Image (tube, rainbow, N blue to C red):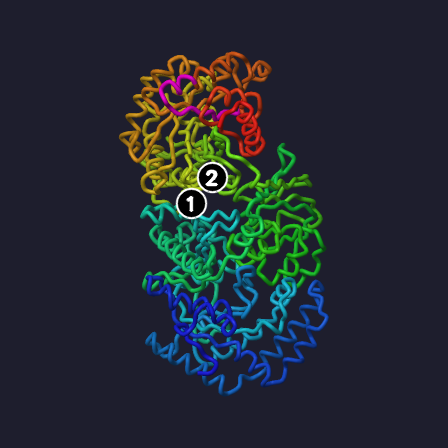
């Protein structure tokens, strides 16, 4: 056939004739199907057919006249002229020989699937599309569940016309593409019955930070257009590639989305081939993928990335769309294209780390939260726009607030200081466009159009991890650019303190030698939220507690309270361990005080009323107590899952507030019985050196444990007899006191004598340069710092080591 190419005839070299999307599907069909990746078959209508259509009616010059001198920032003019062009193309009959070829190819495809008339997806594929530095995401149209000859011809013409949507014209103009050097091919691909299953988008790289070792997957019930178009907040999953390659099961995150609708096939003869219906209560509260399916998709992503990188001769992260057939249970890849944002940043800023941060560290009124897109901060006045026809109201530098931004909003998004939407996930087309044009966006901020009002001045922060925040008022921010190529490596290991797993990927890009303190408390407080003993009673059916319904809501998608607790902790510590892999990551087991546990959901029923919780029922003393032991066993199972099942052998464990060697033996015994065997698979277990007894009896503690990590906060409190929460004596609390320096020195010397690890993870080295220098002089193994003091202290230690002749 002159105008038809079946996928088996195509590969990535055919972009000029079938566009990036169709060429890529052909490449997968030829190269990746033999590797076990499933790809639905189909054919491409070539770009030559597009030119043939235009020239058969003599409309090419008319289109040029309409585009001549157009200013794409004049949205109303753009809208009128683009519509005239689309109407002109759609109103042109297909030449008869082209029409016959399309229907003949459709017949062949239908027969392959043993159907009289196959249900197909009709996808636009521009000849400049899916280049490594421009995604063209969603700029032309796609139509799903197309069936029958009449429908097929109708939607093929619709695709041809969609080369001139407002968004497509604006996108090409802003990136310097000549409208008449870009043609349109149409892909006709057998549908996967994901209307009865699920579908979504995945990236072989973290879309927000550029972290290369994670696959990011989004998923929702039904056809994939709701995920791509941002009309649902999908489920999210992260998978760690290096461990997956070793046969482990490293799902770093499972987050249930809000999937209140799903797209399904419409009834035969309906005006549109698809429709949205409400999901059931069970679907709303369930993950749309099983763990095994998540891992299968991640393996597909790795194979696809490896193939395309090899073919390109350079690292090539990929953006893919997938669909699960609800009838057969099979998972298919329906599209694959190069990721265009983070991959380009790597080329342009390979030795530069850029970090946005708010200068004001105080309390700020949070108006709204959602999913952060990009890592930037935007400031301006709110402009709420309820309909795309009104997007011309947006003024330069305002913050666009709307229900959902699809790529049609691109001309307006370029004028905005930030974008906020009620709906959408971080892999929808609009999020991809926001990253490309460099605009911070918060998607899935439920209620944004109701809670925010036009004229309000706000600060939109996407610089604080996975969650984006809308703050009431204007706050100054700074952008720190760090030239990493100038940093020298010190002999003293510089570790990082980290609590929030959602910031781990971005923090890992700051120069570091690993993590000296990963705090369990943040994970339990923010992911679990309920008191561990309350969850145990709920699991055992013993009793319920105040707030149990909110906890049940959080547990949606997990089998039971124990499954929820264990997996959530494993996910949290796994996220941190993966970000810094294979560098060491020292995870401190939970160290809440009774007053802190009491504030958790259900906590009042399980905690004693202590006059001084700082020196009470905390740390190791809880772990072997009759009341709390089962909760610690669950915690151990979670850590064992992260190390053994997920493959994070770089993870070390640290025990806090250990008062006696006998306590140490009892805790180690519980850990051993729950899968954490000291020395097995390289497991090292440290003790927090934060009590004077740890220093005085260091020899005995170091016979049991693999080293010390000095906790300067508690060690100062207990050496000076100062409650660090007490305001009246706070002026006495000082880590630079000579007694503390002597304690630090004694601990380091004891570890040296036993050839054991000695680090410090307290606040002191971050706050006081002279303490960092003292520790280096005395030969400490590592200093663990807060992320914001890493670079400054790093350089200071390099200079100090040179001065001391340490190399």
Q: Residues within 10 Å of mark 1 (few under 14, many from 20)?
A: many
Q: Residues within 10 Å of mark 2 (few under 14, many from 20)?
A: many
Give SS at disc 1.
strand
The label number, if any, that marks residue 528 in the structure image: none
**Vertical side of 42 occupied by 329: above or below:** above
From the viewer's side, name the closer residue of 616 and 124. Answer: 124
Q: Which residue is mark 1?
A: 253
Residue 449 can be seen in this image: no
- The reply to whether discs 1 and 2 touch (Cβ–Cβ < 8 Å) is yes
Mark 1 or mark 2, which has the lower sequence index? 1
**Vertical side of 744 occupied by 132: above or below:** below
Residue 385 quadrant = bottom right
Task: Give the total number of marks visible in the rendering.
Answer: 2
Q: Position of residue 22 (x, y in %)?
A: 47, 70
**The N terminus: image quadrant:** bottom left
Q: Position of residue 625 (x, y in %)?
A: 33, 22
The residue drawn where x is 56% and y is 49% is: 373
Q: Is residue 79 left or right of residue 124?
A: right
Q: Position of residue 214 (x, y in %)?
A: 44, 48
Q: Position of residue 70 (x, y in %)?
A: 71, 69
Give SS at disc 2.
helix
Q: Which residue is mark 2?
A: 501
Mark 1 vs mark 2, CA separation in Å? 10 Å
What range of the chain is rendered magenta? 749-763
From the viewer's side, name the closer residue of 585 and 424. Answer: 585
Residue 573 can be seen in this image: yes
Magenta highlight on residue 449: no
From the viewer's side, name the closer residue of 349 and 114. Answer: 349
Magenta highlight on residue 761: yes
């Amino acid at each position: 056939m002159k105008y038809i190419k079946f996928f088996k005839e195509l590969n990535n070299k055919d972009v000029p004739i079938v566009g990036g999307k169709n060429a890529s599907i052909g490449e997968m069909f030829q190269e990746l199907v033999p590797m076990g990746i499933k790809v639905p078959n189909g054919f491409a209508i070539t770009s030559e057919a597009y030119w043939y259509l235009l020239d058969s009616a003599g409309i090419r010059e008319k289109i040029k006249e309409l585009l001549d001198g157009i200013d794409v920032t004049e949205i109303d003019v753009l809208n009128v002229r683009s519509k005239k062009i689309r109407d002109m193309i759609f109103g042109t009959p297909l030449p008869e020989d082209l029409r016959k070829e399309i229907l003949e190819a459709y017949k062949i495809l239908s027969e392959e699937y043993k159907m009289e008339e196959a249900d197909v997806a009709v996808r636009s594929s521009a000849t400049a599309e899916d280049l490594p530095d421009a995604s063209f995401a969603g700029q032309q149209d796609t139509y799903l569940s197309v069936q029958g000859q009449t429908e097929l011809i109708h939607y093929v013409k619709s695709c041809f016309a969609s080369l001139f949507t407002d968004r497509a014209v604006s996108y090409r103009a802003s990136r310097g593409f000549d409208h008449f050097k870009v043609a349109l091919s149409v892909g006709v691909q057998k549908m996967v019955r994901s209307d009865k299953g699920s579908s979504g988008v995945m990236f072989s790289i973290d879309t927000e930070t550029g972290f290369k070792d994670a696959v990011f997957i989004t998923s929702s019930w039904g056809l994939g257009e709701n995920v791509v178009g941002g009309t649902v907040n999908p489920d999210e999953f992260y998978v760690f590639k290096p461990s997956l390659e070793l046969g482990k099961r490293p799902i770093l995150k499972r987050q249930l989305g809000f999937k209140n609708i799903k797209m399904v096939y419409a009834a035969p003869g309906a005006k549109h081939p698809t429709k949205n219906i409400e999901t059931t209560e069970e679907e709303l509260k369930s993950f749309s993928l099983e763990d095994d399916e998540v891992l299968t998709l991640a393996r597909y992503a790795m194979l696809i990335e490896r193939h395309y990188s090899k073919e390109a001769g350079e690292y090539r992260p990929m953006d893919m769309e997938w669909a699960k057939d609800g009838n057969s249970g099979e998972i298919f890849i329906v599209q694959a294209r190069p990721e265009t944002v983070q991959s380009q940043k790597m080329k342009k800023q390979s030795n530069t780390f850029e970090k946005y941060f708010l200068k004001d560290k105080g309390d700020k009124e949070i108006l709204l939260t959602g999913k952060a897109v990009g890592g930037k901060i935007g400031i301006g006045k709110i402009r709420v726009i309820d309909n795309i026809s009104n997007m011309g109201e947006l003024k330069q530098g305002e913050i666009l607030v709307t229900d959902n931004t699809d790529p049609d909003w691109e001309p307006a998004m370029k004028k905005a200081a930030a974008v906020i939407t009620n709906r959408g996930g971080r892999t929808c087309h609009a999020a991809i466009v926001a990253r490309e044009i460099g605009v911070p966006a918060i998607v899935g901020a439920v209620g944004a159009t109701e809670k925010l009002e036009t004229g309000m001045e706000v600060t939109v922060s996407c610089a604080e991890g996975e969650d984006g925040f809308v703050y009431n008022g204007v706050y100054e921010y700074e952008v720190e650019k760090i030239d990493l190529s100038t940093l020298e490596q010190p002999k003293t290991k510089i570790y990082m303190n980290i609590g929030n797993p959602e910031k781990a990927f971005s923090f890992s890009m700051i120069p570091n030698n690993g993590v000296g303190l990963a705090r369990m408390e943040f994970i339990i407080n923010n992911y679990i939220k309920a008191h561990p003993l309350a969850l145990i009673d709920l699991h055992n059916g013993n009793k319920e507690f105040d707030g149990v319904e909110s906890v049940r809501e959080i547990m949606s998608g997990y089998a039971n309270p124990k499954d929820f607790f264990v997996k959530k902790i494993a996910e949290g510590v796994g996220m941190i361990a993966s970000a810094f892999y294979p560098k060491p990551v020292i995870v401190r087991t939970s160290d809440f005080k009774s007053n802190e546990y009491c504030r958790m959901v259900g906590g009042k029923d399980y905690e004693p009323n202590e006059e001084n919780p700082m020196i009470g029922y905390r740390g190791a003393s809880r772990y072997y107590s009759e009341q709390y032991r089962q909760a610690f066993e669950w915690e151990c199972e979670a850590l064992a899952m992260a190390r053994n099942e997920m493959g994070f052998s770089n993870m070390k464990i640290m025990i806090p507030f250990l008062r006696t060697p006998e306590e140490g033996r009892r805790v180690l015994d519980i850990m051993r019985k729950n899968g954490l065997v000291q020395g097995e698979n390289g497991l090292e277990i440290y003790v927090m050196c934060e009590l004077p007894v740890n220093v005085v009896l260091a020899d005995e503690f170091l016979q049991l444990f693999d080293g010390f990590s000095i906790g300067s906060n508690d060690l100062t409190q207990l050496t000076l007899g100062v409650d660090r929460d007490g305001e009246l004596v706070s002026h006495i609390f000082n880590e630079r006191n000579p007694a503390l320096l002597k304690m630090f020195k004694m601990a380091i010397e004891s570890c040296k004598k036993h050839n054991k690890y000695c680090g410090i993870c307290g606040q002191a080295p971050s706050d006081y340069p002279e303490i960092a220098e003292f520790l280096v002089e005395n030969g400490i193994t590592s200093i663990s710092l807060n992320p914001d003091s890493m670079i400054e202290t790093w350089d200071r230690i390099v200079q100090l080591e040179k001065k001391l002749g340490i190399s």
